[in-house]
Image (cartoon, rainbow, N blue to C red):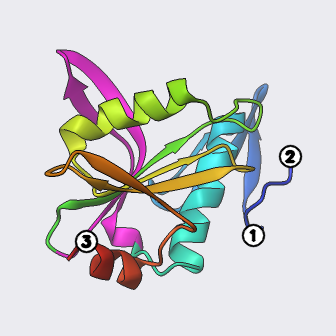
Amino acid sequence: MQALDLPPFEHKLTKSGANSLIWDVLRRKNVVLTPEEWVRQHVVHYLTGYLGYPRGLLSLERGHAYNQRRKRTDICAFGPGGAPLLLVECKATSVPITAAVAHQAATYNQTIAAPLLLLTNGLQHYCWLVDFAQKTNQRLAEIPAYTEALTIIS
């Protein structure tokens, strides 16, 4: 797998037939190692190991409904009260972060209502503060640490 613009982490790979699997610490099981999963796992470890997001407040591939369709979010971090805090949309490194990707994530976030939105392909990272009342987005210079995120939204 390609090196990413995120710190490396200790990962456990196994094989199942033709598939490579990676141990997912949040779901507590091996999952198929796709290019997008490689990015997702790096982001999870970055959020928990470097930015202080509690593992117990992260959810992976959580289902939600949008326009009567079932969708899945890559990563959602929650605040201490259980409200969504950060929605993360992960793409494979070969997928550029375009306006279409931003639109997809913003569309998902209309039902989730996370005040922070992160788009990443492991090489490029774009984070926004979303103000639903004012209908504005403010691009952030970096992904906020958990305690900083709680301060930003309060």
Do residues under tags 3 and 1 come within 8 Å of each other at their CB atoms? no
Q: Is residue 152 left or right of residue 6?
A: left
On screen, 16 above or below 24? above
Q: Which residues are magenta?
A: 55-80
- Mark nearest the camera among 3 and 1 is 3
Residues under labels 3 and 1: Cα distance? Answer: 26 Å
Q: Is residue 75 left or right of residue 18?
A: left
- Residue identified by numbered label 1: 7
- Residue identified by numbered label 2: 2
The residue lying toward the viewer, choosing from 117 and 35, is 117
Q: Earlier in the sequence, mark 2 or mark 3?
A: 2
Q: Is residue 8 left or right of residue 146?
A: right
Res 153 label: 3
Residue lying at 75% horizontally and 52% vertically, measured from the top left: 13
The residue at the far right in this view is 2
The residue lying toward the viewer, choosing from 11 and 50, is 50
Residue lying at 72% horizontally and 36% vertically, measured from the top left: 35
Q: Is residue 116 left or right of residue 9?
A: left
SS for tag 2?
Answer: loop
Dot 2 amino acid type: Gln
Residue lying at 47% horizontally and 81% vertically, measured from the top left: 52
Dot 3 amino acid type: Ile
Residues under labels 1 and 2: Cα distance? Answer: 13 Å
SS for tag 3?
Answer: helix
Mark 2, residues whose alpha carbon is within 10 Å: few (<14), some, or many (≥20)?
A: few
